[in-house]
Amino acid sequence: MLLFGVGTDSDATVSESVLAIQHSTNEFSRQKHEKVRVSVEEIREFIADGGERRVVFVSHGSRDALLDASARRIPYITAADAKEFDNLYLLAYACSSGAYPGGRITRFALLYIGFDSVISAPPSAPSVCYADLLGLYRMMLSYLFNVLIVSPQDGESGATDFLRSLREQSIYIEMKFDTSGGSTLDAEELICIRQFREDISVWVRGVDHPIKCEGERPRALLW
């Protein structure tokens, strides 16, 4: 897998997310980190150099694009760049990244995992649930690393199974810290746990809708 961090070492939210993702897998063959911005051309060249097909982006995002770490939050990947990701498997750990771009990018990419809401960086390592959260990141990255899409139906079925497992693990972690007086977790910790079951969207090439966790209400997407 490849890892792109856009805002690493200049933006605390991006850096904390990058660190959690790095701690969750040893499957990254190469990484490219930029403090502010990376261009589509640089992304294309970096992917082509090694021939890897599974790519993780960590940055800011919107419903229309992945955004850089500048004060103006300038897009560096939009739906117009979809052809650059032909036959690739993608994960965008960025706010709202699973909404509009996902369906357009999977006209070319085989798989696109994103979030259809604002998301949170993980709490710091001293958090009582940090190791549990790393387990959720590990599940997500393992799915990306191992999934093989051979047909839209197969891809949708596999994504549904993955999301079901992720949802069950997320609920288990939350219940682990429940007491008769309420949760021992703070709001930041709960938000990060819940985003793995409530906010992930998986797009598969040939499937015309985002695949969500069972039991979660689909969010209104912009087209």
Image (spheres, rainbow, N blue to C red):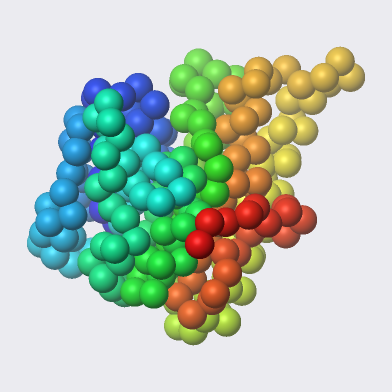
- Kindly tell me whether residue 75 is visible in this rendering: yes
Q: Between 23 and 156, which is closer to the camera in this rendering?
A: 156
Where residue 206 appears, as percent x and y from the top left, is: 49, 80
Whether residue 50 is visible = no
Q: Quadrant of residue 21?
A: top left
Residue 184, located in which quarter of the rendered image? Answer: top right
Image position of 67 with respect to 82: above or below: above
Residue 153 sits above or below residue 106 on the image: below
Residue 183 in picture, x, y percent from top left: 76, 21
- In the image, residue 24 sits, relative to residue 83, either above or below, namely above
Q: Which residue occupies 47% across, 58% down? A: 100
Is 53 on the left or on the right of 166, as rendered? left
Q: Is residue 4 left or right of residue 188?
A: left
Name the spot of residue 95 as percent of width and height, x first: 46, 40
**Image check: 138 left or right of 199?**
left
- The image quadrant where one finds the N terminus is bottom left
Q: Residue at 41%, 51% (x, y): give it.
A: 64
- Which residue is located at x 45 percent, y 83 percent? 150
User: 74 or 120: nearer the eye?
Assistant: 74
Whether residue 173 sits left or right of residue 152 in the image: it is right
